[in-house]
Image (spheres, rainbow, N blue to C red):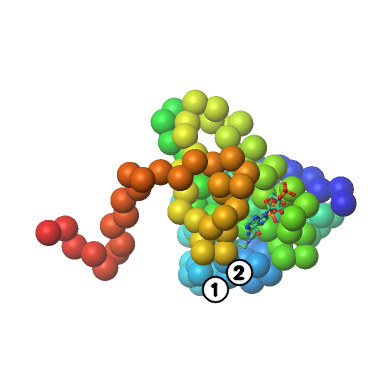
Amino acid sequence: MAIVYNHTVPTVAQFTDLYRACTLGARRPLDAAAEMMANVNLILSAWDGDLLVGLARAMTDRVQATYLADLAVRESHQKHGIGKQLIRMVQAEAPRATVVLLAAPQAHEYYGRIGFAQHRSCWILRPEMALS
Ligand SMILES: CC(C)(COP(=O)(O)OP(=O)(O)OC[C@H]1O[C@@H](n2cnc3c(N)ncnc32)[C@H](O)[C@@H]1OP(=O)(O)O)[C@@H](O)C(=O)NCCC(=O)NCCS
């Protein structure tokens, strides 16, 4: 499988098609796909010919932290090292920064398996939560 990796920002149709072709489609507001792509500052994509088969969507300050918002690999192309390669490239874009993410349930075991460390000090404030 000859996969090409680059910074090409997919079209909204390619983006939503990829997310629907893996379990992430059900977990993301795909009607806001254009915003989700426009408001990050790092997109790395993986292509099998003209077919978008993988995507890393991230925000980085290139110094301290890179928040990996999404990692998606088309189901037909999973377990061929595409996810790992996209993460390698995310890290290489900002080598000084720590890569941070919230794992989807389906990927709970994945990140530990490929070398991430779990962090006890992660805190979140969901939109519906108010500060006390
Ligand atoms: C999770 C995901 C990104 C992994 O991408 P991938 O390209 O299939 O994974 P890789 O090929 O890089 O896998 C690297 C290793 O992890 C293993 N692995 C892959 N998916 C795994 C999973 N869900 N759980 C545990 N291990 C997994 C692979 O078998 C491989 O092991 P090996 O090196 O011993 O052969 C992909 O399955 C996916 O898009 N899933 C649906 C969306 C999702 O949950 N994304 C994560 C959001 S946080």
| Residue of label 2 | 23
The type of residue carrying mark 2 is: Thr
Q: Is residue 1 left or right of residue 28?
A: right
Which of these two is toward me, 57 or 84?
Answer: 84
Please, is residue 74 above or below residue 85 in the view?
below
Q: Residue at the spot x=77%, y=59% of the render?
A: 77
Q: Residue at the spot x=81%, y=54% of the render?
A: 48
**C-beta proximity under 8 Å, tags 2 and 1:** yes
Q: Residue at the spot x=43%, y=36% of the render?
A: 65
Q: Is residue 132 left or right of residue 70?
A: left
Tag on residue 26? 1
> Does the numbered disc 2 mark a residue whose Cβ is under 8 Å from ligand 1?
yes
The type of residue carrying mark 1 is: Ala
* SS for callout 2: helix
- x, y (%) of residue 33? 53, 64
Q: How many marks can you see?
A: 2
Please, is residue 8 above or below residue 27 in the view?
above
Question: Would you identify the image quadrant in which residue 74 lies?
Answer: bottom right
- x, y (%) of residue 105? 51, 64
Q: Residue at the spot x=67%, y=50% of the render?
A: 83
Please, is residue 6 above or below residue 10 in the view?
above
Q: CA distance from mark 2 to mark 1?
A: 6 Å
- Does residue 120 appear anywhere in the picture? yes
**Quadrant showing the C terminus:** bottom left
Local crowd size for mark 2, using a 10 Å CA cut-off: few (<14), some (14–19), many (≥20): some
| Residue closest to the far right | 1
- Does residue 40 appear anywhere in the picture? no
- x, y (%) of residue 75? 72, 65
